Every structure is written in C-alpha cells, then in structure tokens.
Amino acid sequence: MHFKLASEGRGRGYSRMRGIVESTLDLVYTGDWPRRLWGLTERARQVRVVRTKVEAQGIPPLRIAFASDLHIGPTTSPHTLDRAFELLSEAHPDVLLLGGDYVFLHGTREKARELRRRVEGVRARCKFAVLGNHDLWTTHRSIEDALTEAGAQVLVNASVRLPDAHGNVAIVGLDDPWTGKPNVARAFEGAEGAALVFVLCHAPEGLPLCDGRAFSLYFCGHTHGGHVSTPLGPPVIPGRIGRMLVSGEHHTKWGRAFVSRGVGGIEVPFRAWAPPDVVVVDVVERAATNDSFENRRFA
C-alpha cells in the first residue's frame, strides 16, 4: 500500500495517520463505486442556492457567485457537480469565486481536466480561486494549472481590483490557514483604498487573521456544514472558529462572513442535515438612510 506523503504538496499538517486513512480509502474506493452508488439517488442532484446582498454607494450592480469544496473524486457524484455548475451558470455572475478543496485524495490529471472543464463552462467576466487543505496536500500545481487554463486567477496572499466600472472593488485571496502560510499584510496590499473588499479564503480560521482590516464580506467553506450533521447540529467540526461558524451568514466581531457548506463529498458521499450549496451575492445600491454593515468592524 502506498502512503501519500505531505511532500507531494506544499501543505502543512499532513500526518502519517492521515496518509494511512487516505491510502486505505483510495484502495477501498477503487472504481469510484461510492459516487456511482450515491448518484443513483435523487439527493445527489439536490444542491441549494443561498442568496445574500451587499449594499454599497456608488458601485454599479455586481453579482458574485461562490462555490467551495468540490472534492472531485470517488465520493462526489457527477450529478452533484453538474447541478452545482448549472446553478452557477444560471446565476449569470459577473465574478466567480472558488474556495478551494477541488479534489479528494490524489490530484490526478483526470481530476484536473474535469476541474478545468467545469470552471471553464461558467461564463463570468472574472474568476478567482484559492486553494484548500486537500489541494495543498496533493500535487497542487496541476490544480493551479487547471484553474488558470479555465480563466481563473489563483490568489495566494494577493489581491486584485476588478476591471472597468468596478475598479473600486477588490478581491483578496488569503492562503489556507490550516495547511498554507497566510500573510494578511501581503494579501491586502492591493486592496488599499477600495470601496468594497471581498476576502476569499478556504476556511473560517482565516477570519480572525483579518481583524482590524476593512472588508465587506469574507467567503469561505471547509466546514461542509458538518457534512453528516443532526437536527441539533454537527457532532464534529475541526477548529474553534469552524464550530462557531458552521455554515451560512455571520456577523462577527472580526467582520461579516459567509460559510458555504460546499458541494462535494469526502470520506463518505452522503450528507445529513447539511445539503450542498452554492452562494450568490448581489451588490446593490445602499439606501441613504440605511446604516449598513459594510466595510466596518463589528463589536
């Protein structure tokens, strides 16, 4: 049995036990039978669209679509991915944001090709992506290349301004706080003076790192909403911040955040009380009398 080593990617925190678990799953899931079996159920086609808005003054209307945790691999049904990307395309976004964890287990050429095909199929003026822990634990260069070839700019502790009339809007990409090396100062350099700042990071644990920075909304995934949850909440979510911000929209002392449940599967293909989702955010004109939450810290 081959134990995948952390040296295959630049990610931190890949333990020997994790390698044993993933190598075992790689063997047990030969032939991708879990995703084929799960794909026979109607629930494999059920992906939710979650909508919210950001109010701003002097910014032309803008639509942002966000998806995270695709986990292309043996436990994610193609039907689930098909539906998620249909919903992203139907939203007609100006900007597509991708929150990392594009694969589960090895980052093979086949998975990279599928990632490229799916991201390429969404028509958006701009596409931006960050990497997640599962990407950084594997051969992430092929994943980065696939995203780039699909028209997405991979942001690693970097920021960019949107073009043309939205030049006062910045996208900040922060490296994964679990396995990467996040550098907030470097990430925000290009966002100084922007009227709207959107932060893209794989996990909720990057949110406290942005304390004191002016931003409008922090996008992340990683938690899967617990993946296999209960009516009383998920039994296990790694990380203190992840347990605080399981899924959905949150107004915190560090700023406003949206945590997606993600799309794909990991150790098991099915979910319970944590349906997959994609997120659509509309930037709209702020009413003159509205005390907006945007671009300020929360007490």
Image (tube, rainbow, N blue to C red):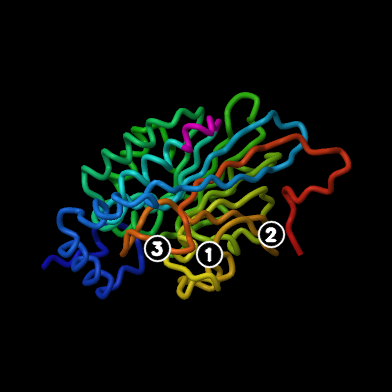
Does the magenta portion include 45?
A: no
Residue mark closest to the camera, 2 vs 3: 2
Q: Quadrant of the C terminus?
A: bottom right
Mark 3: secondary structure? loop
Mark before the other along the chain sequence, 3 or 1: 3
Taking the spot 47% from the left edge, 39% from the top edge, the residue there is 128
Residue mark closest to the camera, 3 vs 1: 1
Please, what is the three-letter code of the amino acid marked with disc 2? His
Snapshot quadrant of residue 206 = bottom right
Say left or right for 123 vs 251.
left
Q: How many marks?
A: 3
User: Residue 143's x, y, as percent?
Assistant: 31, 45
Please tell me whether residue 72 is drawn above or below residue 167 in the rendered image.
below
Say left or right for 215 vs 199.
right
Mark 1 residue crowding within 10 angstroms, few (<14) / some (14–19) / many (20+): some
Mark before the other along the chain sequence, 2 or 1: 1
